[in-house]
Image: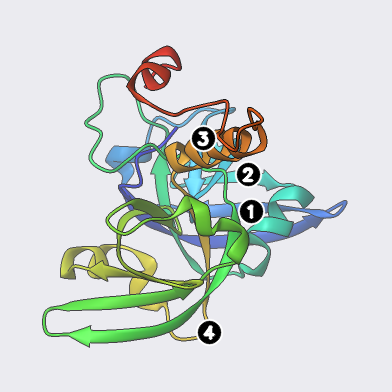
Amino acid sequence: MFTGIIRDVGRVRGVTRRQGGLRLRVQYNNTKEFSNLSVDESISINGACQTVVAFGEGWFEVDTVEETLSKTTLGALHNGALVNLERAIRPLDRLGGHFVLGHVDCAAPVQEIRELGSSRELWIAFPDDFSTMIVTAGSITIDGISLTVAKLETQLFAVAIIPYTFAHTTINELKPGSRVNLEFDILGKYVALQLGRASSQDSGDGRSAARINEAWLQENGF
């Protein structure tokens, strides 16, 4: 599990195709953050949870399988490409972002980048299948970065990018037409699932037999 707070911007230093998948070698800069890596450790690369299979001084490697390539932008990475990096959280870490699983839902295109004085507004299109999982002021992960939905339209949303985030992530590499990895908030997914189940369970008098209320939330661990 991750928080969406990027710890380093790494650079791809090797792309090797292996039986339909990829072996990626990534060079990191923050030696303090990444110096004690181990095999089998999880690392978020542009928001996709990957497993370290080899490492050395200043670098590590992961195997990216077909399922990941079909849902993310990792297959488009090339030598020299910059990537956002975050290690899995520890129980004592500060949760500065939100709960991020590293399970990318889809890749989506950047529609527009607006300059707003000291900040920027990033507009991204998303598939209608995910419309029930996104709300204004809710959390969303873009290329592994925890951000807040500032505006929401039909199949289009915007996030505000502060100068620090722009300078310390790969957001500054994006332009209209760039594709980014999206992970919608896990809480929104569960709520959407339960609402779908509730609407399908009709009691016969037109009312849903299931209700999401305070008692239901407590019963289900919220």
Spatial separation of the CA atoms under disc 1 and disc 2: 5 Å
Kind of residue indicated by mark 1: Leu
Q: Are marks 1 and 2 in contact (CB under 8 Å)?
A: yes
Spatial separation of the CA atoms under disc 1 and disc 3: 32 Å
- Tell me which numbered mark, 1 or 2, is placed earlier along the sequence: 1
Read off the residue under disc 3. 190
Give the class, few, some or many, for how many residues have Cα within 10 Å of label 4's Cα (few <14, many ≥20): few
Q: Can residue 29 be spotted in the picture?
A: no
Read off the residue under disc 2. 62
Q: Are marks 1 and 4 in contact (CB under 8 Å)?
A: no
Most extreme residue toward the top is 219
Residue 168: % across, % down:
26, 63
- Tell me which numbered mark, 1 or 4, is placed earlier along the sequence: 1
Give the class, few, some or many, for how many residues have Cα within 10 Å of label 2's Cα (few <14, many ≥20): many
Most extreme residue toward the left is 118
Q: Is residue 186 left or right of residue 66?
A: left
Read off the residue under disc 4. 177
Give the class, few, some or many, for how many residues have Cα within 10 Å of label 3's Cα (few <14, many ≥20): few
- Tell me which numbered mark, 3 or 4, is placed earlier along the sequence: 4
Residue 8: % across, % down:
34, 52
Locate the N terminus by quadrant.
top left
Q: Residue at x 64, y 32 (%)?
A: 202
In this orientation, which residue lies closer to the viewer: 64 or 27?
Answer: 64
- Tell me which numbered mark, 1 or 3, is placed earlier along the sequence: 1
Spatial separation of the CA atoms under disc 2 and disc 4: 27 Å
